Image (cartoon, rainbow, N blue to C red):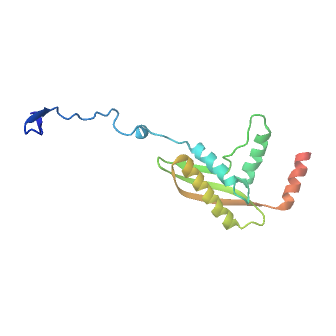
Amino acid sequence: MTDTTMTPEGGHEPQAPARRATRRGGGDPATRGRTTIADGVVEKIAGLAARDVVGVHAMGSGLARTFGAVRDRVPGGGKSVTRGVKAEVGEVQTALDLEIVVDYGVAIADVARAVRENVVAAVERMTGLEVVEVNIAVSDVKLPEEEEEEEELRIQ
């Protein structure tokens, strides 16, 4: 069957059948395929974001920091930004556990709140994952006199 349209003179003029636009690949190119993000990627982002907060002296437990200090001195060992961070990454969500050392004199609750805010903002912005929880364990408080002792040990 051919569609017709009326001409100004009252006659009929044949019209070509309407063409349907053909799409290849089915949909928006940005939605084709899947992106996976490794736990280590999220751990690095969270570790760097946590270290940026004023009042966070270090990340990880005393033992982890000791091994980390040794590893930092070994050529090629590098500094571990994931120390003190554990991530569980799913397809659209992630949960994080952080172990921090705070500076003496800071309000721990305020530091923990700031760490959560900074970590959630960084991880969600960079990965697109929803951060469902950030658990923080404060494993130590860095006292001012401890810094002097560390300096003496480094010199020897």
The part of the image, by quadrant, that contains residue 75 is top right
Name the image quarter holding the N terminus.
top left
Left or right: where 155 falls relative to 61? right
89 and 12: which one is in front? 12
User: Is residue 3 placed above or below 50 in the rendered structure?
Assistant: above
Left or right: where 17 falls relative to 70? left
User: Residue drawn at (73%, 42%), measured in percent from left and top?
Assistant: 79
Left or right: where 18 falls relative to 38? left
User: Is residue 38 placed above or below 144 in the rendered structure?
Assistant: above
Left or right: where 33 falls relative to 100? left
User: Residue drawn at (69%, 61%), measured in percent from left and top?
Assistant: 138
38 and 33: which one is in front? 33
Residue 6 position, x and y percent, is 11, 39
User: Residue drawn at (84%, 58%), measured in percent from left and top?
Assistant: 146
Among all residues in the image, which is located at the extreme front? 9
139 and 47: which one is in front? 47
Question: So how many labels did they put on this image?
Answer: 0
User: Is residue 121 placed above or below 110 in the rendered structure?
Assistant: above
Residue 120 position, x and y percent, is 58, 55
Name the image quarter holding the C terminus.
top right
129 and 153: which one is in front? 129
Residue 86 position, x and y percent, is 61, 50
Residue 74 position, x and y percent, is 78, 37
User: Residue drawn at (43%, 39%), measured in percent from left and top?
Assistant: 30
